[in-house]
Amino acid sequence: MFPNPNCYKLRNLSRQFQKTVADMMKDELKSISERLKPYVKEVSLDSHPSANGILDTVISAKVHGLKVPSDIDNKLLEDLERVVVNEWFYGSMISSEVRRLGMGRLMGVIRDRMVHRAEGTENEENGKLKLALYSGHDTTVAPLLIIMDTFDKR
């Protein structure tokens, strides 16, 4: 389940937090840009390729056994990861409103299932199940972990 892309308030909050993260990570992005200068002109949240795109590409290459230049070390990847995690999840980490607007539907479904189970009111209509599985991407799982106070910022 993805957040409602038509929610005006959530879109505005996301844009505000995107600007906040860009300002917050300005020095880190400048350092990353310097270290990646042999490969890309600039690294920012909206550059091409973006910090997220670079991180995904390098991690994917490494896990598939492809050679990565030696100057792209673990420290650089950790710095990129910190920037990308903040880019994607900073709003959810600090704003209950972003969490509520972004995860409200999924949390509502989970809550309803738990309440019906606890009250013994499960039936065919509201889903009498032994197990409920939900599919999600990191953009769903991380905010859910944030709501449950178990997110490790990775």
Image (cartoon, rainbow, N blue to C red):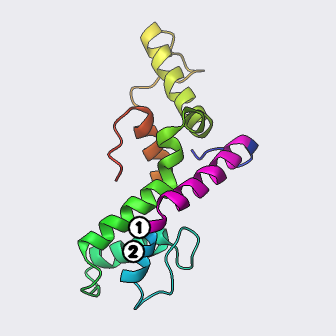
Helix, strand, or loop for circle 1? helix
Q: Which residues are magenta?
A: 9-28
Q: Does 128 appear above or below 33?
A: above
- The disc at residue 66 is none
Query: Residue 105: x, y in percent?
Result: 60, 33
Q: Please give the name of the residue rendered at 49% of the width and 15% of the height, measured from the top-left corner.
A: 115
Query: Residue 15: x, y in percent?
Result: 65, 53
Residue 115 seen in render: yes
Q: Residues within 10 Å of mark 2 (few under 14, many from 20)?
A: some
- Residue marked by disc 1: 28
Q: Quadrant of residue 37?
A: bottom left
Q: Amino acid at mark 2?
A: Ser
Q: Is residue 22 left or right of residue 34?
A: right
Q: Is residue 12 magenta?
A: yes
Q: Please give the name of the residue rendered at 29% of the width and 80% of the height, measured from the top-left corner.
A: 72
Q: Quadrant of residue 73?
A: bottom left
Q: Amino acid at mark 1?
A: Glu
Which is the main secondary structure of the residues drawn in magenta? helix
Q: Please give the name of the residue rendered at 33% of the width and 79% of the height, measured from the top-left corner.
A: 61
List the single residue furthest toward the bottom. 38
Query: Residue 45: x, y in percent?
Result: 54, 67
Dots 1, 2 in contact, CB < 8 A? yes
Q: Is residue 91 magenta?
A: no
- The disc at residue 31 is 2
Q: Residues within 10 Å of mark 1 (few under 14, many from 20)?
A: some
